[in-house]
Image (cartoon, rainbow, N blue to C red):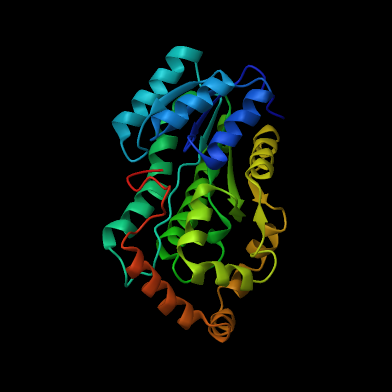
Amino acid sequence: MRLELRDRTILITGAARGIGAQLARAAAARGARVALVGLEPAPLRQVAAEVGGHWYECDVTDQAGLDDAVASTVQRYGGIDVVVANAGIANIGTVSTGPVDALARTIEVNLTGVVRTVSAALPHVRAARGHVLIVSSAAAFAAMPGMAAYCASKAGVEQFGNVLRLENRRRGLTVGTAHPIWIDTDLVRDIRDDLASFHTAQRKLPWPLNTTVSVERCAEALLCGIEARRRKVYVPRSIALVQALRPVVLSGFADRLIDRFGGAELAERMEAEVHRLGRSFGRTSVEGGQ
């Protein structure tokens, strides 16, 4: 059954910027009540004012904070019909350039943050026989130098969603995982601006892995996925081919192909660029969170 969004309550993490903020706008335009969770109070307040929604400052790795955000949303709106676990970050650089805390922080936010978000909201979404959308990535199906922690976390997010779906099939709750490719957000622009090597590598990737999608188009795809209670949302849809060809994409043949296109040199250039930058996250990224 379709999930009509009018008068439904949607809680979105990572809602201060990018996909989360645009998803809030699109959901509100369909008549949904929106609760925004994130780390940046000023943009959260601004987006909430735009959509007439509720906002709560919270780090998704803080269980007590998430529990309070959920409780605050339930107190205001009476329940939660949809939760979108969207918060995510990406460190820049290879494993050898570290620091290890940046790698661990990426995994903590992207994977553990999803687990904590879903756990906090699940009793309410289950009671509403609603929908959980977990934002993974096309990076769950592929590997690229400089993205070890990001790819690992997004692959984990996909499997968490797959198991959560199986656990709740008989309870009326539906679960979807979203797999966007490069979305034109601050996070992606930061990486491109900081690392010339990364920008060059992205352009060399085969279609559809070299595709860039607007944040508006991405938010609309996610919202349509929620309404249809889809188990998988690919942005763009051609990313489904990457998942279908995952054994090839992650094969020894693919490794050799990446080497042929300068994979080893890419890693070396990236390490030098990160060393010159002197930081592990993008300029406008919130290093401590999402």
Left or right of 228? Residue 73 is left
Q: Is residue 260 above or below residue 39?
A: below
Q: Residue at x 54, y 82 (%)?
A: 252
Question: Residue 176 or 32: which is nearer the viewer?
Answer: 32
Q: Residue 172: tell me if it is visible.
A: no
* Placement of the N terminus among the 4 image quadrants: top right
Give the residue drawn at x 47%, y 66%. 195
Q: Residue at x 64, y 35 (%)?
A: 226
Position of residue 188 measured from the top left corner of the image (x, y, whole percent): 52, 54
Q: Position of residue 145 (x, y in %)?
A: 47, 72
Figure disc tally: 0
Camera sees residue 100: yes
Task: Report whether 189 appears left or right of 219.
Answer: left
286 vs 16: above or below: below
Residue occupying the point 58% across, 79% down? 254
Q: Position of residue 166 (x, y in %)?
A: 54, 44
The quarter of the displayed image where residue 19 is located: top right
Q: Give the camera-side residue of 22 and 113.
A: 22
Residue 250 lies in what quarter of the image?
bottom right
- Asked where in the image residue 239 lies, by quadrant, the reply is bottom right
